[in-house]
Image (cartoon, rainbow, N blue to C red):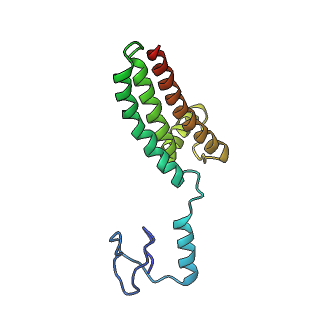
Amino acid sequence: MICDKCGYRNDDDAKNCSACGAALGEKLSPEEQEKMLRRLSDRSDILTPSPLENVLKWVFLASAPVFFVLSILFFKAAAPQLGIIITIFSIVAGISAGYPKFMWSLSKLRIIFITDTSDLTPNSFWSFGRKVSYWLFCGGAVGLFLFALFYNLK
């Protein structure tokens, strides 16, 4: 039996899923099992972060406090607000990389204010723009940090 919720393969006589505890339904035919496994393992959805994006999310989010602490330590001559801006850039890059559903919700909300459309779906151009945005925010954070660092070393 394959769990409808998590896709775990259980024994044929199991009543509940061994992985998530959900109640198991009727035994599926081999065709239905294959269809469910394809649906559960499909990572081609635009709103599902790739494994690389999941790693980038944590790298960007972990770099935010590091940038903030380094900004406090090294940016004595530059404006202290620059450290906050760098931190915000890193956080936005992490959210954009790891949470495409949230980013699509924000985009959809913006579009709904302009038009009366509620049945919107993201396209590949939106996905490309999201990927460009998190690299731009990451590059902006690193660039601002290096600029402020070299500015203080002079």
Is residue 49 in view from this perspective?
no
Which residue does the image show at 59% across and 42% down from the upper left? 131
Q: Position of residue 149 (x, y in %)?
A: 45, 21
Q: Position of residue 105 (x, y in %)?
A: 51, 42
Q: Residue at x 58, y 56 (%)?
A: 45
The reply to whether residue 131 is in sight is yes
Q: Residue furthest front?
A: 154
- Please state which of residues 73 and 27 is positioned toward the viewer in this rendering: 73
Q: Residue at x 38, y 34 (%)?
A: 66
Q: Report the number of numbered marks.
A: 0
Determine whether 6 is above or below 98 in the image: below
> Can you say whether 93 is above or below 38 in the image?
above
Q: Is residue 120 above or below residue 146?
A: below
Q: Residue furthest bottom?
A: 13
Residue in front for this viewpoint, 77 or 120: 77
> Looking at the picture, does residue 44 appear above or below residue 146?
below
Q: Quadrant of the N terminus?
A: bottom left
Q: Nearer the viewer, residue 34 or 29?
A: 34
Q: Which of the 4 image quadrants contains residue 135?
A: top right
Q: x and y percent of residue 112 in the render? A: 56, 36
Furthest toward the right, the residue is: 125
Q: x, y (%) of residue 14?
A: 35, 83
Q: Nearer the viewer, residue 96 or 79?
A: 79
Residue located 59% across and 47% down the image: 119
